[in-house]
Image (tube, rainbow, N blue to C red):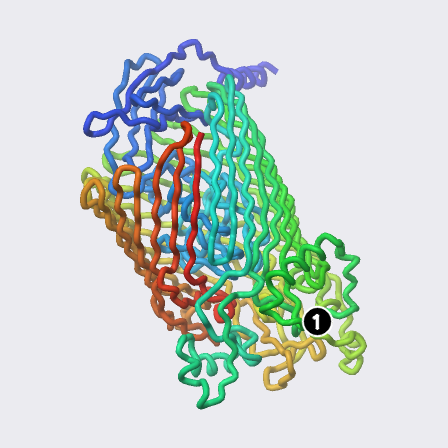
Amino acid sequence: MFKQSLITFAITSAIFSSHASAAQLKGKVLDTNNQPVPNATVHLHGKSQSVKTDINGQFSINVDQDSQLHVSKDNFINERIDVSPDSPYVTVKLAPSSVESVVVYASALHKSNIEMASPVAVLGGDELKNSAKPTLGETLKQLPGINASYFGPVSSSPIIRGLDGPRVKITQNGLDSSDASRVGPDHANTNDSLAAQQIEVLRGPATLLYGSGAIGGVVNVVDNRIPTDVIEGVQGAAEFSHDTNSNTNTVAALFEAGNNGFNFHFDGVTRKGGDYETPRFALPGEDHEDHDHDEAHHDEHEEHGHDEHAEEEHGEESHDETEYAERVANTFIDSEQFNIGTSFVGDHLTVGLSYGRIETDYGIPAHSHEHHDHGDEHDHDDHDHDEHAHDDHDEHSEDEHDHAHGAEEESVFARVKQDRWQALFNYALHNNWIESIQVRAGFTDYEHAEIEHGAVGTRFSNETTELRTNIEHRLGQWHGIIGYHFSDSDYAAEGAEAFTPATNTKTHALYVLEERRFGDVTLELGARVEDFALSSNFTSGHGDHDEHDHDDHGHDEHDHEHEGHDDEHMAEVIDYTLDTTNFSASIGAVYDYTEGHNVAVNLSRSERAPLTAELLSNGLHIATSTYELGLGYHIEGDEVHFEPENIEQERSTNLDISFRRFIGDFGYTVNFFYNDVSNYYYQRNTGYMYTGEHGVELADHHHDGALPVYQFESADAELYGFEFDAHYQIDARNRIKVFGDHLRAELDSGEYLPRIPANKLGTSYRFELEDFAAELSAIHYMTQDKLAQSETKTDSYTLLNASFSYDFSVSGVDLVGYVNVDNITDELGFVHSSFIKELAPLPGRNFKLGVRGYF
């Protein structure tokens, strides 16, 4: 009893130790010319809150224990100073950085992108606001090493070094976005760039903090929905913009207020627009419906290509009946979302809660059911046939889209709804070894319904509960975090395109990340152990989803009697669980070999288990025009059996080497990477075809409307390449920049991986004169002829863009007016990484006009 009381007393003393020695530390932040640096962030390790310097560069902050003061400002090199309650007035000098330098929230150790061992790109500030697009993929795709899956501009997810889908984690303030964008390329992510303070892209494996789903990288969207700094008074912003190409209007607003540590936050975005226009392009014919999955498509593509002069070459002389288009039908968007949050920020305690709501309708191009009519057998009433959905769809399809489809073709659009709750607790202990305890928790309720014929054809849902606990500490000269991460996701799909069964995925993980300074070298060590459990109860046997797949092809269910599949192979209900342990570890170092220069090396080993789509898929995926099978299935003759034997984890061994110069007028970041992946999960054409009437058959049994059967397999693969970004500040007004990337991705057999983005090379020139700024950029996407099975070559193209902005004020309100011109030359470009590249080229010339105000 005495021993237990002693332990309790020790713990209580550590957590609630006296802060009688607390003192207010005052100081000033200057630049290298001894001029004050206003609005710099001053943060004491262990506390969630920070303070800002005033217009004279001055600040004051409470210090109650020996700690480290972290001073940062965008585009300056961070400074760290050891302080104590007895420290006198401090003066901190910040040297300007010649490359963008931003504190990365996803790093967990308060590091900037030029201090981290692994490569990070950050987009924020006015640059983010001016370039924000409806989806993360389109917003980020110009960054080196980043591309987009591109299922049209309203459904486009980030690709990091050729990896996307379940290998790239999308997070909001460090918690999973929990939508369905990792399941299929036609599913949009639920993160809006306009509401963000900054977007961080962690290139390469980031599994230590974010789990096995981050084996390819992390995109973290940072916003202030739970304020972590003290807000005094009222502040906010509002913005309106118009895109001429798709006639899209966007309105965004931000409002924050605070008093005595109590804060309130609101932000909201509405966006409404129609189909987007493109330069004239040839539409694929009937033989091309499988979009890159049919060899006949390849032959026809080589004949006609993507040449805008194809009509002249193959027109009147050959009586070519190729159809052309100057608009991608069914790419409208109608979106509303808002976030509200509140918090209390004290000297040691920060607690907060937020709620966000998203309601978005968007068109899904190349997803019509002209050839996949569901007929009357589909019981739409069981799928929430609501008149509102029918009315909205009629409005979009009749007013904006039917002109491109024809009366016989019914467009399909997605209706996305998401409710997201987030909570934050941070307590700064500031004793001798524990700096702080932080808990982030979230609950997300997501629903994605695909509306066809005015009714719900397929419904996807995902409910996710997530908890992350970090203990930040100092042990001797080591600084780091120890954490616990829990995630519970209930995913379900029902209806015509439910090619994956309902699944529960649960993870428990423990992780540790430590760093220590040895002279000019900072060493980082980390490890994570993750218990991963995937469980599903589903019907197995030939045609697991026949109850809706047959209807997709307009066949009456009684037509199957001659096949006898249902009689001979009765469906079996299977209760399946995959339970495994994923282990990840990393070692990295940053060597500051001279002032303003460093080299970073990071070696990591990561593991992940297959997710639902990769393991359990068995059904028609209309968006990709394929019949998909997961790793757990085997084809024997014309039979499909569920035999999940020898399911091995995907293991990645990744090496990153980065060279950086960030001082003076010239700066650069160059990253080299090599990723050796064992048991890489990918889709391969099986040589079988599928129809609702005949099921799975060899391809030599040709039937109208048959789609190729693609199955997930695993094989060893290598991905390697480099990315670079260099700046030269000619003088105070002029700056030039060169950037680019190169990627090679292939299996050990020598075959190339599918849909690997083309390499790109870009340059930009920026001019600033007082309140006016202008930038001209050109990005060249190279020919992609490193092709996987059944892929077609994608020709090169160059996009020329310009932007102009002017700062002014009206009645004391600071305003920014801007004009962006994208694709000035109206270039026709196709995205190799897109499943529908020939049906959805990039948008043509677009003018975006906007005005933003701050108060």
Q: Looking at the image, is 132 positioned above or below residue 455? A: above
Task: Give the residue at x 46% y 83%.
Answer: 299
Quadrant where the C terminus lies? top left
Tell me residue 579's x, y (percent): 60, 52
Task: Give the residue at x 71% y 67%.
Answer: 544
Tell me residue 43's x, y (percent): 38, 26
Tell me residue 75's x, y (percent): 30, 38
* In-image side of 569 versus 814 (left or right): right
How many labels were placed on the picture?
1
Front residue of 542/477: it is: 542
Q: Looking at the image, is 644 positioned above or below residue 408? A: above
Quadrant where the N terminus lies? top right
Does residue 277 appear anywhere in the picture? yes
Task: Give the residue at x 81% y 77%.
Answer: 558
Task: Give the residue at x 58% y 18%.
Answer: 4
Residue furthest bottom as drawn: 317
Location of mark 1 (residue): 373
Amino acid type at mark 1: Asp
User: Which element carries disc 1, helix, strand or loop?
Assistant: loop
Front residue of 289/495: it is: 289
